[in-house]
């Protein structure tokens, strides 16, 4: 089962990455954009916490996204050391293409499944995730 999960995750990630490359995005950047679509003007720390990636990955992604004109980072009024991230018009214009990308990825992922199989898969995936995360917490690793 573990190998099947690994293969699935790898194939899904590779397909998502190809779709993102076609939009001139790197994997993970869409997650940051989606967080900003929900609430523009977050601090870099808030974004870091919401996407669950490490500091250097988020910093590098934000820098690339700023260079691409998708967002701007500016010091917060209350503390010049805190960076606030805002979408540009170009960044805001990515909302629909990213939603379409996720829709395409989902449709491609389930095209060989019945509706019941897809629902069962989602339930199973969440059950496995819960088993792994609750075990990690019980072991003190999480």
Image: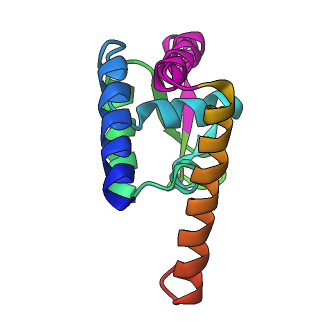
Dividing the picture into quarters, in which one does residue 122 lie?
top right
At 63% across and 60% down in the image, what residue appears? 127
Number of marks in the rendered image:
0
How far across and how far down the image is residue 88, in percent? Answer: 53, 18
Magenta residue check for 100: yes
Magenta residue check for 89: yes
Colour mapping: rainbow
Closest to the observer, 49 or 76: 49
Q: Is residue 99 above or below residue 138?
A: above
At 36% across and 60% down in the image, what residue appears? 2
Closest to the observer, 88 or 82: 88
Q: Is residue 80 above or below residue 104?
A: below
Direction from residue 126 to residue 97 in the image, left or right: left
How far across and how far down the image is residue 63, in percent? Answer: 34, 36
Q: Which residues lie in the magenta part?
A: 85-113
Direction from residue 142 to residue 13 in the image, left or right: left
At 36% across and 21% down in the image, what residue appears? 20
How far across and how far down the image is residue 27, in percent? Answer: 36, 34
Q: Quadrant of the N terminus?
A: bottom left
How far across and how far down the image is residue 38, in percent? Answer: 70, 32
Dominant SS in magenta: helix
């Amino acid at each position: 089962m573990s190998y099947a999960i690994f293969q699935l995750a790898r194939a899904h990630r590779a397909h998502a990455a190809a779709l993102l490359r076609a939009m001139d995005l790197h994997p993970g950047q869409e997650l940051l954009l989606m967080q900003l679509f929900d609430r523009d003007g977050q601090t870099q720390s808030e974004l870091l916490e919401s996407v669950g990636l490490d500091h250097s990955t988020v910093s590098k992604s934000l820098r690339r996204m700023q260079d691409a004109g998708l967002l701007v980072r500016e010091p917060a009024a209350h503390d010049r050391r805190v960076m606030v991230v805002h979408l540009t018009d170009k960044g805001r214009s990515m909302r629909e293409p990213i939603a379409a990308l996720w829709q395409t990825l989902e449709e491609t992922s389930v095209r060989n499944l019945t509706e019941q199989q897809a629902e069962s898969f989602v339930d199973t995936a969440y059950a496995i995730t819960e088993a792994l995360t609750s075990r990690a917490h019980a072991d003190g690793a999480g």
